[in-house]
Amino acid sequence: MLQNEFMTRHRKSAIISAALVIAFMAVSGCNSSPKFAVESYVEGTLKVRAEVDSSSNYAGFRISVLSRTDGDVDTLGTAVTDRSGAFSMNVRAAASGVYPMVVERTGYRLSIDDLVVVDGDSARVTGLYPLGPAGLRVVSSENAAWSAYKNAKASHNQQMLSLMRSRAYTPQDVGRITAQTSSVLWSVPSAFPGTIGGELSMAESVVMMEGWSDSTVLARLPLVSATNASIVEVVRAARRSKARIAGQDSALALLDYYLKVTLEAKHPEIMAEKVIAYSDSFQTQDAIRIATELKKKYPDSEWATWAGRATYELENLQPGMNAPAFSVVTRENKNLSTASLKGKFVILEFYDPSEQIFQREFVNRDLIADELDERVFATVSISVEPDSVVNEAIFDGMSHPGHFVWLPTGMESKIVRDFNVQILPTRYLLDPSGQIVTKYTGPGIAKLEEDLASIVTGLNGITEVPVLKKVN
């Protein structure tokens, strides 16, 4: 369960998010780093299509490179085109990374593109507005590597989408496409050595093979530099591959090795992975020991907070333990409590009605809740959104099975703290005695349905249930 909590933001197909925040974290990071550690040069020409504006006056395009597009935004570089459409600027940032480049004119935002900023790099940007499907053209070795990475991922996603739409695919088909994409990504660093896109491609090519070819993961691992920005994601995948091939002791030894060879900044994440490794093998006391070490070694960091939550979960929220007692009032003013639900399997889910994962899974949630016999199962959905108007919006002209609860104090509510909810949605499955069966975080509705189908199979006394059915 700790792994689910820790890994939700590190899905195999989404390491890109980790690379994007490298720069963002550095911008707001420690004071020991210089404010502007890297500087690159950008020049180019922006024009307007003749059928839109035949004046040949291309002045007034404002090009800005930002630390991010929302929240606390810093401008890292800005320029305005002259009549010919030409511009140039220096971009200064706290760290190398991928930053948004925004183009505006007459108060309107025209485009947002990625710009790789690395010390000493230079890039040339050209564009003809309104832009075509290709968007802005950004030319530099760094940006070419980034484009190669993005194109490989876009092709992978399109192949996977086509495969799923065919409704005739097998796990072998998914593995074949995954292996093909992994091979393409592995080749990017050879074409663009020493680039951010190359490093990220190499890391993701390893991570996405975990579970498909553990031997490939372990063969490629030594070729990934310990200074790779995504080395922790690679080590995390390799730890699981190593455990499957050579056992828990070898996997732990691998983590200990990378604690020696990686940068100090990566050590908290690797220690956290040791906590997860021990937890996965039900070595609870060892997991608590490493979590305690993590908290002591980095007392003022986010990892100390994570270690505290991990320790609480290890001590209180493991499968087979009694779930924390709770008492809530439903939307219909009905009292629900641990005692009143005893004797039933309980799906206890925490959600935010505006959160995209929950919205995507809401239909399946309703189908599951509707098919379960209320004599045996109860579905309790708890919104952490304090605004009752927002909560009621999902009932506008619709009804939904199960019990719904609004929490006026949201994430600060006792039940949220007792169940250690950090990621939304979070779901717990409790057995009729009130013990925890398992926990699901993030997009976990499919696994929940699979587990419920197994329970229903047992209750019906048959060997196979093709779909989730009501218990008679």
Image (spheres, rainbow, N blue to C red):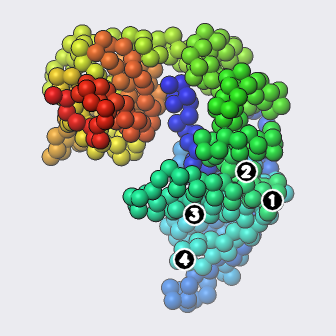
Find out whether the residues at labels 2 and 3 contact each other: C-beta distance under 8 Å: no
Image point (34%, 19%), residue name: 430
From mark 3 to mark 1, how far is it between C-alphas?
20 Å
Circle 1 or circle 4, nearest the eye: 1
Q: Is mark 4 on a helix, strand or loop?
A: loop
Nearest-to-viewer mark from 2 and 4? 2
Amino acid of disc 4: Gly
Identify residue type, mark 1.
Answer: Ser
Residue type at mark 3 is Ser
Find residue 62 and report its horizontal and vertical position in percent: 62, 67
Distance between the Cα atoms at labels 2 and 4? 30 Å
Choose the circle earlier in sequence order: 1 or 4: 4
Q: Alpha-carbon distance for marks 2 and 3?
A: 17 Å
Pointer 2 local density, CA inside 10 Å: few below 14, some 14–19, many at least 20: many
Marks 1 and 4, how far apart in space? 30 Å
**Which image quadrant for residue 141?**
bottom right
Q: Which residue is drawn at 50% across and 16% down?
A: 313
* Residue 8, position as x, y percentages in the image: 52, 36
- Which residue is label 4 attached to? 132
Return the residue at label 2.
202
Name the amino acid type tagged 2. Met
Q: Name the residue under label 1.
A: 190
